Amino acid sequence: MDKIAVATGAAKGIGRAIALRLARDGVDVAVVDMDLEGARQTASEIEAMGHSALPIRTDATKSSDVNEMVQTTLKEFGRIDILVNNAGGREGKERSALSSIERRGLESCRCAESQRGLQLLRNLGV
């Protein structure tokens, strides 16, 4: 499979599992997370499978970070075929420990992240 993926929230948890699964399926992955060290660890595991990985520190709530992440990915890989919007914004808290206000904020963040990411890709013709 000759595909390129961007996986946000890929330093740990579900995002990491998705990034690793994509690599097992033959996909090269931009491993995106606010936790750069965790992203590097996930990227190392992907590279050990024989696939390319690019760890990128990105705060998905900041348009400037998202723009830079997309540009970096395009410079390295030339295109983006798959976008996994998994950035959470929980800052290490379990979902059950979040207040209802924090949960609503998390859902708003994910919605905004998806909309920003998709609009940016459309603008770039990806």
Image (cartoon, helix red, strand yellow):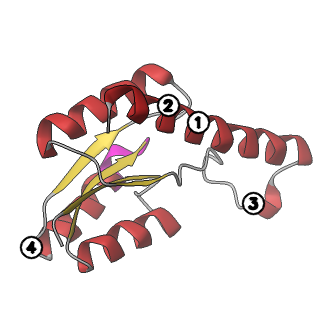
Q: Are the residues flagged by discs 1 and 4 in contact, CB closer than 8 Å?
A: no
Q: Where is residue 122 in the image (x, y as percent from the top left)?
A: 42, 33
Instruction: Please state which of the two labelled residues, at mark 3 or mark 1, is closer to the viewer.
Output: 1
Q: Mark 4 points at which residue?
A: 50
Circle 1: residue type: Gln
Q: Is residue 36 magenta?
A: yes
Q: State the CA–CA distance, disc 1 to disc 4.
A: 32 Å
Label of residue 119 in the image:
2
Circle 4: residue type: Gly
Circle 2: residue type: Gln
Q: Which of 89 and 115 is in front in this view?
A: 115
Q: State the CA–CA distance, disc 2 to disc 4.
A: 32 Å
Relative to 25, does residue 110 appear above or below in the rendering? above
Is 34 placed left or right of 124 in the picture?
Answer: right
Residue at 20% in and 74% down: 26
Mark before the other along the chain sequence, 2 or 3: 3
Label of residue 95 in the image:
3
Residue interval drawn in magenta: 34-38
